Image (spheres, grey):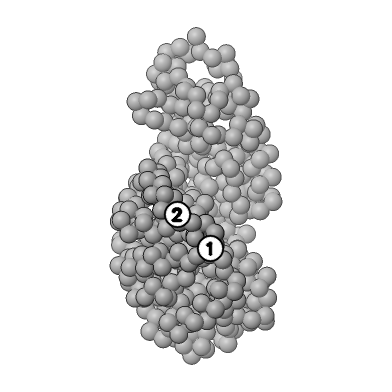
Amino acid sequence: MPHPFLTLDPTGAAPLYRQIYTRFRTAIAEGLLAPGERVPAARGLAAELGLARGTVEAAYTLLTAEGYFTAKGQAGTFVTPRLDAKALASPRLRARTSADAHPMGTQASIPPFQMGLPALDAFPRKIWARLAARCARATTVSSMVQHQDASSALRRAIAGYLQVSRAIECVPEQVFITGGYRNTLDLVCRALLKTGDAMWTEDPGYPPTRELLHHAGVETIPVPVDTDGLVVAIGISRAAKARGAVVTPAHQSPLCVTMSLARRLALLEWAEQAQAWIVEDDYDGEYRYASQPLPALKSLDRQGRVLYAGSFSKVLFPGLRLGYLVVPEPLIGRFEEISRIFQGGPANLTQDIVAGFMAEGHFARHIQRMRRLYAERRQAVVAGLKSVFDDRLQIEPQPGGMHLVVRTHGSDSELARRIRADGMYAHAVSEWAVQAEPNPAILISFTNIPTESAASMLGRRIMAQID
């Protein structure tokens, strides 16, 4: 006999697959199903309920996509281990509270379309655990007593990787290890900027960049973005003597356009003439699907005006809180001084694990696997969403990255709010703009949506917020 909580109403308004999905989710939240508990096989449950197998599989696919279930091949399907059941008790309230508190924040339970997250199900946990255990065993008494500079191996690994993958010629001494992008930008502000300086920022652009610069006492100059990237001429007209610019040339955040060669050269020329600094935020430049990843802006820099910021959050996992900054050689001494005063540096153990992961070739192989996986998932998610979207929502084709731009009619901020209230996630492009008036659109990630069918079911939930 099926579980009592799976009693269905064939005459109800909700489709049967949706009823199964809702009842499983409620059972988990109420403790009737515990994390790690095995659930009935789709074929067997369908037979017990007298339903088509596809109906049960549709519910299971949605539950898996949202993180409630974990499929383990022939071993069966299980309630996701270590799932916080209490946090799932009121998904609408949880999503609304978190989104209102900080729209850029994350949640303990990953909602569908959560941006900024790599495909966590494809991360090589066994390799990582082996390296972590080896590094932990190698811990010395001196490293336990005081923090030591463990970054030399990691700096060498990063410098070698960037020369091959991003065409950046640098030596390990130019690489500074940080606690992620925000920590990187804070380091730049302390080393090169002072209160009252002006910096160009992309409009629309990544909100935390403006927020951090503002709190550092730096004036932000919004510069519009078009299909060729940052409009350098407008930046010059608004603040020709600005101290610098923060740009995302490989894959503009959030519009996904790539800065053209002409714009890159114009930006470098302005920086040289104005003696300004360019911070290149290459947050997901590894992921390009129409062709090979483009060389970094830093690779064109012959005058030493570009500081290249990278992060492991998008390519490994955000919990690392690990990033890096490549500075021009004349600035090495200045950044060493500021780092010594203000930057404690990530934990030795974390740096050792990542250095080993890179040195043994796992990092490069992982990037290649993710590039193939994301190309597949991107295609599947686009197909699944298009199958249920009508002319009120259009997906813009993108050359790369980890999210989709979905054009809307009407208020994108209101649609994004409704999507978050339904336990999913979305950003409104209009909320990333300062002076620009971009066409309304929402931003959603595809990296953790495994199949076309899961995407189509989630797409129906999005459409329900419009109707």
Of residues 237 and 298, which is closer to you in this image?
298
* Residue 190 can be seen in this image: yes
Circle 1 residues within 10 Å: few <14, some 14–19, many ≥20: few
Residue 56 lies, with reference to residue 299, above or below; the image says: above
Residue 431 placement: quadrant:
bottom right
Report x, y in % for residue 413: 63, 53
Amino acid type of the residue that numbered disc 2 sits on in the rendered structure: Thr
Residue 194 at x, y percent in the picture: 64, 81
Q: Nearer the viewer, residue 224 or 265?
A: 265
**Residue located at (55% from left, 55% from top):** 441
Q: Residue at x 32, y 50 (%)?
A: 369
Q: Is 279 in front, or is 145? A: 145
Q: Which label's residue is closer to the chain start, 1 or 2? A: 2
The total of numbered circles placed on residues is 2
Question: The C terminus is located in which quarter?
Answer: top right
What is the distance, in whole Å, between disc 1 and disc 2 at their CAs? 12 Å
Q: Quadrant of residue 167?
A: bottom left
Residue kind at label 1, given as amino acid type: His
Residue assigned mark 2: 139
> Regarding mark 2 in the picture, which secondary structure is present there?
loop
Residue 186: give its label.
Answer: none
Question: Which residue carries the number 1 mark?
Answer: 147
Q: In the rendered image, is residue 26 in sight?
A: no
Q: What is the x, y in percent for residue 436?
A: 60, 68
Q: Is residue 286 above or below residue 171?
A: above
